[in-house]
Amino acid sequence: MQPMIRNPKDFWTGLIFMAVGAAFIIIAQDYAMGSARKMGPAYFPVVLSGLLMIIGLATTVRALITPGSGVGRFAIGPMALVTFGVVLFGVLVRQAGLVPSVAVLVLVSAYASVHFRLRTAVLLAIGSAAFCALVFIQGLELPIPMFGPIFGE
């Protein structure tokens, strides 16, 4: 007899997507929804969560229909490195500024990959930092320093 779940990786991915979407919809219940014309603080998270749940449902259904690979080992080390990079970004952004913080985030997170190459990671860090500076500081005019007080600004 053939197992009902033909693609365990997609099945669990779909369930995780639906759980995260449901969690954010539950969290957003205390906020005002608003309308498409005048969005409240819950509008954007609820719409994104709904889309995430739809993608999760489609992924889960696909896992029951098409065959695929099983779930591999849980990569705790790389996950911890990426989490550390995000925490480090949060700690550094006020004192170092957006550009160095994004660069550090990208470098630490890239090191988590088995395909890590220093030259590629440095180029990606420079490009990401420049892109974030253009979008968030120049374009959206967010009050985040490009380079923080530890660089004399």
Image: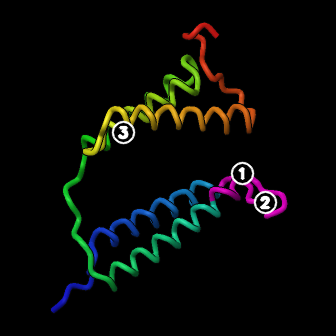
For mark 3, what is the residue? 110
Q: Earlier in the sequence, mark 3 or mark 1?
A: 1
**In this view, the mark in front (2 or 3):** 3
Q: Amino acid at mark 1?
A: Pro
Q: Secondary structure at mark 1?
A: loop
Q: Amino acid at mark 2?
A: Gly
Question: In the picture provided, is 32 more to the left or to the right than 77?
Answer: right
Image coordinates for residue 30, horizontal then vertical, percent: 66, 54
Q: Earlier in the sequence, mark 2 or mark 3?
A: 2
Distance of mark 3 from mark 1, alpha carbons?
A: 33 Å
For the magenta stretch, what is the residue range? Answer: 30-45
- Would you call the spot at circle 3 few (<14 residues within 10 Å), some (14-19), or many (20 or more)? many
Instruction: Please name the residue shown 75% across and 33% down the image.
Output: 141
For mark 2, what is the residue? 34
For mark 1, what is the residue? 41
- Would you call the spot at circle 1 few (<14 residues within 10 Å), some (14-19), or many (20 or more)? some
In the rendered structure, find residue 120 and report the number of the disc placed on it.
none
Question: In the picture provided, is 96 more to the left or to the right than 36?
Answer: left
Image coordinates for residue 15, horizontal then vertical, percent: 39, 68
Image coordinates for residue 43, horizontal then vertical, percent: 70, 59
Indicate the quadrant where residue 107 lies.
Answer: top left
Q: Is residue 86 visible?
A: no
Instruction: Please name the residue shown 39% across and 76% down the image.
Output: 60
Q: Amino acid at mark 3?
A: Ala
Q: Secondary structure at mark 3?
A: helix
Tell me the chief SS of the magenta region: loop
Q: Is residue 44 above or below residue 126?
A: below
Q: Is residue 15 visible?
A: yes
Q: Earlier in the sequence, mark 2 or mark 1?
A: 2
Instruction: Please name the residue shown 48% across and 29% down the image.
Output: 103
